[in-house]
Amino acid sequence: MASSTDETKISIRSKSSFKSNGIDLESMRKISSQFFEMVPVRRMKWKDDDAAMLTACPDLQIQLLNATVRHPVCKNFPPALAYRRYFMKLLIQKLEAGEADVADEVYEAYTDLLSYPDDDDETVCFKSYSLPSGEYISLQESVHLVSQGTTGLSTWQVRHFVLCSLKC
């Protein structure tokens, strides 16, 4: 069930599985959902317990990578490059502040993002929203507030109402 228009492209992707070795499944989904919705990184809601678990267990760090920057939705419908870089930078800062043994894969994922030229961060990105079924709806939008003389190329709060109607 996918549709597209000239201004917005919507795709639905299948659900993914999360392993739970400390961080509960719901917490991992919330972090992942906030990442795909491009919630400002500093406003992301992380439980203190989750951050402590991430600092204690490199395997959980890898699971978080797999639920965010390495997730198939991110590969096919990536959030803005600048957003992904900032997410990874703050994740590493959070882990290092907790004196964690940061998994090599975390550093590799960050340096991979840094290796992309800035001009690769084109004028469009994707925001993906998870449905209760675990599937994702991805919306293509402009990274600019005003584009082609309109604000119609970016999602607004109305997206929540549309998603609610799809969830019912």
Image (tube, helix red, strand yellow):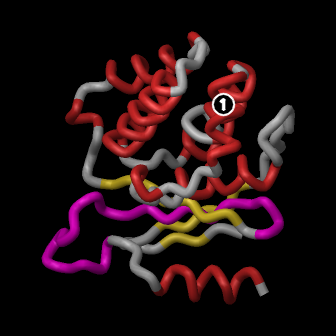
Viewer-closest of 61 and 79: 61
Which residue lies under the disc numbered 1?
Answer: 54
Which residue shows up at 28% across the image and 35% down it? 120
Instruction: Return the x and y of residue 136 as percentages of the image width and height.
Output: 67, 60
Please tell me whether residue 3 is drawn above or below residue 69 in the rendered image: below
Instruction: Return the x and y of residue 163 as percentages of the image width and height.
Output: 63, 80
The amino acid type, in three-letter code, at marker 1 is Leu
Quarter of the image that includes the N terminus = bottom right
Viewer-closest of 61 and 76: 61
The reply to whether the magenta stretch includes residue 168 is no
Near mark 1 (Cα within 10 A), the count class, few <14, some 14-19 or many ≥20, is many
Which residue shows up at 25% across the image and 26% down it? 117
Which residue shows up at 55% across the image and 67% down it? 10
Q: What stretch is highlighted in magenta?
A: 132-153
Q: How many labels does the image show?
A: 1
Q: Left or right: 112 with respect to 164? A: left
The reply to whether the magenta stretch includes residue 149 is yes
Viewer-closest of 12 and 145: 145
